[in-house]
Image: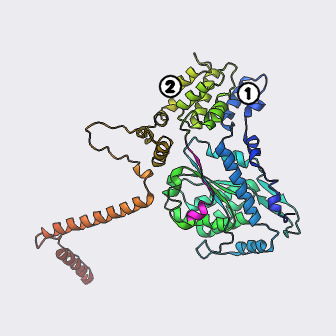
Amino acid sequence: MPPENPLLDAMGPHRELGVWPDLLEHNPLDHFPENPTAEDRESFLDMMKDRFAVTRVAVETAFDIQRMIRSGYRERNPCDPANRKKIIEISSIEGTFATKTPVFYRDSQCKIIHGITGMGKSQMVERILGTYDQVVIHGRSDSALWLKHTQIVHLTAKMPGDGSRGGFVSAVLLALDSVLETDYFNDYCRSRMTVEARALKTAQLLALHSVGLLVIEEMQAKNFMGSKYRSELQLFFLGLLSFGVPLLLVGNPLAFKDIGMYRQTQRRFLSCEPAELWPYDSWKSPDWCDAIAPAIWTYRVVDQYQEYTRKVGKTLWHCSGGIPGYARKLVSEMQKSMLLRRPGSNHSIESMEKHFKTLASFAQFRPLINGLVKRNLDEVVTDEDMPIKELKLRWELANPSTKTKRQSTPNAGPAAKNKNATDWESYSKKTVRDQKAAKSRAKNKEKRNQETADQLEAGDLRTPAQHADKLLHGLRKLHDE
């Protein structure tokens, strides 16, 4: 028999790969009334965002998340005396996270899920974690030496907009309070504790509550990769892993551009293969034409509709650029027009194309969508959150014989560099370039100052000697007075 482990037992039996599709598939229309009222139609149309179609990436991510949580609980088995000792040592640490802080667990895993807005990252994570109980209350355990223990299987916190460690620590404490009905936020955030002490206390709480997975949402280029607090945040994340808390980092690809620059961060943060959610580059992609597109198109609260065909899937791809969020919005607006009884509105390919061209809310999306469909970087580059360099490489690898389109004018001079070019350039190279530029500016300024000084007459107050003499004269006068 395997050793007793109450933390692992709370997870239930291990789920085989083939079990996940049925667990993840979700369609709110399964509960749609047979004779719906107008209010039913409106409310179920709003639930369209909860429709989840199973894809290959979703199943693989579910498998990885299960492995991360179970592996972490095996390593932290509270029935092992060595682990009980570690918990006591963790809770007794004072001060701050530092390089001298002991590494209690070396095998805690971290996984990154990245994709642009609209790819359904958060929905996928919520759907996977929703198949588990979030909080488990344990009673007396003679093996673990518990009278009572509250275990948190998974916890989600959002990265603050300013990327500050204090803001993130507050988000974690609020998340703990929301699932435990505690008051940790007021206990620590409204005290006179320093941010460093508060961060350590938060990490200790996560370890003491046996958090199986901490999900960090909304990681962007501005609030992580470009944040002035990035080094402190990375140290905090490493501290959490050292305390045995697995991490799931979710956000935009640009947030993780240099996560592997250093060996320590590379080994810990990339211990699990990242999940990459890119816009579907073809309407023929199995995940698109067999899962995403039919799930969106057949989610209908209207009585008259066009059946799903591969032509529908192709048109839906052309009108969304392979981004599920845009496809869902388009089909939702189309049915909303029917509920509002707008003239000529119906559920058809023609209506979908018309809404794509006329919806005011799609005006800002159309350049990006057209650029993705045509594989034209000049249109895609207008989206500052798009990792252009990686997207271009994906397109070229998918079709090596076809170069990515780049608009140009014959006999014209070199194209002006896009203001967002640094978004996809190497962060380290940019830093070196900025340092060189700063040195050049300082040297040029010094040269200009010297040239000006050489041209001044002897009695000019701008000369260093006359300027100093003037200041000394004023000081002597004040002293005499």
Residue 40, percent from left and from top: 73, 27
Residue in the foreground of this view, choosing between 260 and 256? 260
**184 sits to left or right of 34:** left
Comparing labels 2 and 1, the label whose residue is closer to the camera: 2
**In the rendered image, is residue 480 in sight?**
yes
Q: Can you identify the residue that label 1 sits on?
A: 40
Q: Residues within 10 Å of mark 2 (few under 14, many from 20)?
A: few
Would you place residue 304 above or below residue 431 in this image?
Answer: above
Residue positioned 73% across, 34% down in the render: 28
- Magenta region includes residue 13: no
Whole-percent x, y for residue 182 in the image: 75, 59
Q: Quadrant of residue 47?
A: top right
Residue 151 placement: quadrant: bottom right
Pinpoint residue 369: horizontal percent, then vertical percent: 49, 35
Task: Give amino acid for label 2.
Answer: Thr
Asked whether residue 275 is drawn in magenta, I would say yes
Residue 283 higher or lower than 262, as above or below: above
Q: Please identify the quarter of the rendering in which residue 455 is found.
A: bottom left
Q: Secondary structure at mark 1?
A: helix
Residue at screen point 34% across, 47% down: 417
Amino acid type at image mark 1: Asp
Question: For the N terminus, which image quadrant?
Answer: bottom right
Residue in the foreground of this view, choosing between 252 and 264 = 264
Q: Residue furthest front?
A: 401
Judge left or right: residue 151 versus residue 335.
Answer: right
Where residue 447 sits in the image (x, y, percent)? 21, 67
Residue at the outermost top position: 343
Label 2 sits on residue: 358
Q: Which portion, as a residue range, is magenta?
A: 265-278
